[in-house]
Amino acid sequence: MISHRPRATVRSLEAVTKQSWWRRTTRPLRVRVILWNAGVVLFTSLTLLLAVRVQVEFTLRAELDGILLDELEEAAGEIAPGNNFPATLDEVVLTRIVDRETYGHGHLQEYVEILSADGEVLAINRTAPLNRPSPMELPNKTPLTIGGYRIVKQSLPKNTQPARAVVTVGAQASMIDDQMRTLDRIVILTALTSLIAAPLVGYWLAGKAIDPVSQMTATAAGLHPEKLDERLPIRGTGDELDQLAMTVNQLLDRIFAYLQEHRESLANAAHELRSPLAAIRSSVEVTLQQPRPVAEYEELLESIIEQGAALEILVNQLLLISESEREHLETHSSVLDLRDVVSRSASMFRGVAELKEITFTADDLRSAEVAGNKFHLREVVNNLLDNAIKFTETGGTVRVTLQEDAGAQEAVLTIRDSGMGIAAEDLPRVFDRFFRGDRSRSRDTPGTGLGLAICKAVVEGHGGTIRVESGASGTMFEVRLPLASHPASRRISSSEPSAASDTSPHN
C-alpha cells in the first residue's frame, strides 16, 4: 500500500527547500555586500527622487498660483481703483482689461473672466475655454484646481457685501501635469540606471573590500601543523582587517610556539623514558647470559625496582602536566588553610635539611585561606622545598614564609635559599618542561626536569602566579594565590585526586 505524504509536510519541505536555496545563494559575503549596497543605494535614490518630485510639483504650483494672483490683483485694481467700484461698467473697457491681462501668457492657456453679481458674463478674453468651471461659490483669492483648471477669484468691491462683480483668473493645470510626467520619466530612468549600476558598483566595491579576506582565507587554508611559518598579509592600512590579520598572526605565533614546545617535550620525555628502560634491558640481558649467584639476581631486581620507581615518578608527572593541558586539573575543589599544607611539607623536609646541616626556618607562617586542591598545592610546596634543599650546600639556610597581601587579596608563599644561584640566561626557561640548567645537570642532583613546570601549571590553574629571583648565590621563589574570598578564586565541585597527584618531589 502506497502511503501519501501529508500536504502540510510537503509544504514544510518546500519551505525548507526554498529557505535553504536562499541561504545558499546569500551565504557568500560578497553577495551580501552587493545586496546591502544595492538596497541602500536604491532606497536612498528613490527617497531622494521622490522628495525632488514632491518639491518640484510644489514649486510649479506655487509659481502658477503666484502668476494667477498677480493677474487677479492687476485686473481688480483696474476695474475698481482703490476698491472704488464705478457706477457703471463699460463692456469695451472690461474687454480691453481682460485682453491685456492675458497678453504674453499664452503658454499657460490663461483666461480672465469678469462676471456680474448674478453670474452674467460681462467680459472674457477670446481664448477662454468653453468648459471652464463656475467660480461663483469659490472663496476669494484661494487658488483651487477644478475640472483640470487652476482658478482663483475675487469679488468686487473687496470686503464689501453684496458683491457687484466677480473677477476670475484661470489656467489649465495640464501644464504642471505634463512637466510632472516628464520628471516622472526622468525619475524612472534614474531608478532603473541605479538598479543596474548599484549591483555592478557593489560587486566591485565588495571585491575591493573582500579581497584581503580571500587572501587571509587562502593563506589560512594552506597552513599545516608541520608548516606554520606562513603569516597573513598586513596591508598597513590599520583598519579592522589589518587588526584581524595581526590577531590571527599572533595566534599562529602562539600555536607555533606551543607545538614547538610540545615536540621538544615529547622528544625529552622519550629520552627520559628510553634511558632507564635501556639500562634495565641491558642489565637483564647481561645477567641472563650466564648463571649467577642468587645475590646478583637480588641486586638486579632491586635495581629494576629503583629504576621502576623513577619511571613511575616521571609518568605521574607527565600525567599531571597532561591533565593541566586538557583543563582536567581539578584545582579549586575546597576551601583550605594554606598554612596547614605548607606546615606539613615543612615538617617532612625539616629532617632532610638537618641531615645536610642546613638551617631550615618555617616559623613565619600566617593563616591564609585559599580555594584549591590540597594534593596539587602540596606538590608545589614539596617541589620548591626539595629544590631549595637539593641545591643548598652544607651550612646554608632555607627560609619559608607565608603572608597575606590584603591589598591584592592574595596569599604569598616565599621560599628562599642560600644555595647556588640560577644563571641569568637560564631564568627565562626555568619553568620549561625538561629544562635543566647547568647546576642541575650533575649526576649528584637527580630529577626529571618537570618539577617547576608542574608548579607553574598548578599555580596558574589556581589563578595564581609564580616567579623566581636569583643571583650568583641564593634563589627565591614566590607563589601568589588568590584568597578564597577573591573573585579570581573560582570554586568547582570537589573531586578525588588523580593518580598523577601522588608524585615525589623531584625536579
Image (cartoon, grey):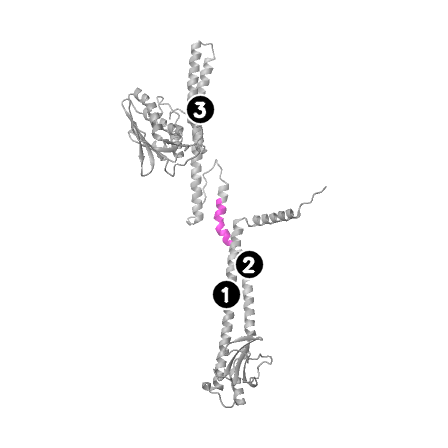
Give the secondary structure at mark 3: helix
Q: Amino acid at mark 1?
A: Ala
Q: Earlier in the sequence, mark 2 or mark 1?
A: 1
Describe residue 39's horizontal placement relative to residue 470 as left or right. right
Question: Could you tell me residue 60's position as x and y percent?
Answer: 51, 72
CB of mark 2 within 8 Å of CB of mark 1?
Answer: no
Magenta-highlighted residues? 203-216
**Circle 1 residue:** 51
**Circle 3 residue:** 273
Q: Amino acid at mark 2?
A: Ile
Residue 315 versus residue 72: which sits nearer the camera?
A: 72
Question: Could you tell me residue 223's position as x and y percent?
Answer: 49, 39
Q: Is residue 253 above or below residue 42?
A: above
Circle 3 residues within 10 Å: few <14, some 14–19, many ≥20: some
Kindly report the secondary structure that dominates the magenta region of the rendered protein: helix
Describe residue 368's horizontal placement relative to residue 179 as left or right. left
**Circle 2 residue:** 196
Q: CA distance from mark 2 to mark 1?
A: 22 Å
